[in-house]
Structures are given as structure tokens and as C-alpha cells.
Amino acid sequence: QFIIDELMAGQVAQVAQHKYGCRIIQRLVEQCHANQVQELVESLLKDTTGLSRHPYGTYVVQNILEHGLDEHRRWIVKVVAKDIRVLGAESHGCAVVSAALSYGTDADRLALAQILLREPGLLVFLASSRHGHIAVLRTLDLLVGKELEDARTRLQAEAESLRLSRYGRLVVDVVEQNDSKHQLWGVACRAGA
């Protein structure tokens, strides 16, 4: 508890953006009771977008998505949905988008996948990036029916350009195989998801 108290007395956001400080916060979120870290997490979530875009802060946000309370997950998913174009445009933000598509509630994950599909060109852009391709695979895993076919059609239309990148090739392979969800995760695991 004294560590949490010291962090709250200082600049907790700066600690979250430090090479080693982010790890301390992650372990606290994982190991401490939710009541102990609630104030700490809420303080961090005031700048969810900024932390998500930071090289070390991104790990804290992803960790909160994985180990935090449902209310914290919902807050992060809401921010990601609002700023999806900004977060999707860079590597660290893409990692948070992918985590939000993994750890949010089912309804939040589906809503986020649908928002990603509605953003012009974003699905194809993400498909060729390191963390973004995992967000695309998770999106394909969440969507059903017409939305899934729409996503597949968009990706197939850009297959030639996607094949020029390592990660784009993985996404195109999944889309072209038109296989089950198990195939999606097999490819994602091979890609290091």
C-alpha cells in the first residue's frame, strides 16, 4: 500500500511513462486488490489517449484492459472508440486497439470492431502494421454476416498492396482461406500475437 500512496503523492502519469515505472504500475494492477489501486488507475485513465500513444504508457493501458475492473475496461474502450483513427495511426496506439478488442466486454468489443469497420481506409491501413494486423484479425473474429463480408471484401480489394508487407500477407492469407475462427488465431499465433 505504501508504494501506491507514494505514487499517488507524486506524478503517477510520469511513472507510467518511465521505462521501469510502467512495470511497477503493471505489477500493482495485477497483484493488488482492486480497491487498493482504484484511485491510481482512475488517475491514469484521465489521459488514456496520451498513455496509449506513449512507448511505455501503452503497456500500462493494455495491462489495465487485461487485469482492471470492468468499469475501467469500458472507459478505455470508450476512449479508443472515440480516438480510433489517432490511435490506429501509430504503433503504440494500435497495440491498445488490439488489447481493447481482446479484453473488453463482448458488447464493447463488437461495437469497437464495427467502429473500426466504419472508419474509411483504417481497416486496410491497420492490416499492414505490426500491432494493427492483430486488431484486424480480432475484428474479423468478432464480426458476423454482412459486416464480416464487407470487411473481407475491403481487404481482398487491397490484397495486392497488403501482400507487400509481412503482416498484411498474414491478413490476406486468412481472408483468402475464408476459414474458421481457429484459423485466425493460428495465423495470429504464428505472427506473435
Image (cartoon, helix red, strand yellow):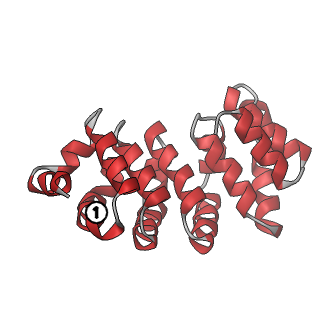
Residue 142, percent from left and from top: 71, 62
Q: Residue at x 33, y 44 (%)?
A: 57
Quadrant in the picture for the N terminus? bottom left
Horizontal relation, residue 23 to residue 40: left or right? right
Horizontal relation, residue 119 to residue 13: left or right? right
- Three-letter amino acid code of the residue under disc 1: Val
Q: Nearer the viewer, residue 156 or 185?
A: 185
**Quarter of image, res 187:** top right
For the residue labelled by badge 1, is the local secondary structure a helix, a strand or a loop? helix
Residue 144, percent from left and from top: 79, 67
Q: Residue at x 23, y 66 (%)?
A: 39
Residue 157 seen from this side: no
Horizontal relation, residue 179 to residue 41: left or right? right
Residue 64 seen from this side: yes
**Quarter of image, res 8:** bottom left
Residue 159, percent from left and from top: 79, 37
Residue 176, percent from left and from top: 88, 43
Give the number of callouts: 1
Quadrant in the picture for the C terminus? top right
In the image, is residue 68 above or below residue 171? below
In the image, is residue 105 above or below residue 134? below
Residue underneath mark 1: 37
Q: Residue at x 74, y 55 (%)?
A: 140
